[in-house]
Amino acid sequence: MGTPRDDARQAAEAKAGRLFAIVLAIATAIGLFVISPFIVVRTSGVWQSAVNRALADQRVLKTLGEPVEAGWSFSYDQRATETHIEIPLEGAAHDGTLIATGVETGGVWGFKELKVVSSSGTVIKLVE
């Protein structure tokens, strides 16, 4: 059996351990809440297809300057069968924004709007 001082120290250590576990659980939950939408959208068919089509278009590569990469941040508005997304593109010569409106019909996504607007003002329509 320990001294009262030892008992108090052990109680304080146990309390600190519980507090750390609670803080860690809350931080993990907040992180998942914040990160999950980004992961879901970036791995979605609309995001992937839009970025792949833009980066494969020679007009986009020529206007923005190679290499062109999609930025990490983006904005999106998702509804039941329609998703609007704006993705920053970073090129060697210019930056731009990839603007896509994807529409789901019968489980298949297509684009109602897909274009790149460069910082120089050039608009490149990837679908008509």
Image (spheres, grey):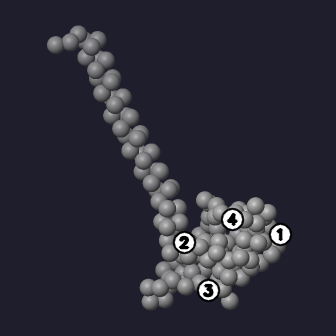
Is 22 situated left or right of 80 in this image? left
CA gap between label 2 and label 3 equals 16 Å
Q: Residue furthest left?
A: 1
Q: Residues within 10 Å of mark 2 (few under 14, many from 20)?
A: few
Front residue of this view, candidates 48 and 99: 48
Q: Which residue is mark 4?
A: 68
The location of residue 86, given as percent across then percent down, is 64, 70
Q: Which residue is mark 3?
A: 112
Between disc 1 and disc 4, the foreground one is 4
Q: Is residue 51 visible?
A: yes
The N terminus, quarter of image: top left
Q: Mark 4 or mark 3: which comes first in sequence?
A: 4
Q: Which residue is mark 1?
A: 120
Q: Which residue is mark 2?
A: 48
In the image, what residue type sits under mark 1? Ser
Residue at the image position 70 percent from the left and 69 percent from the top: 97
- Circle 4/circle 2 CB separation < 8 Å: no
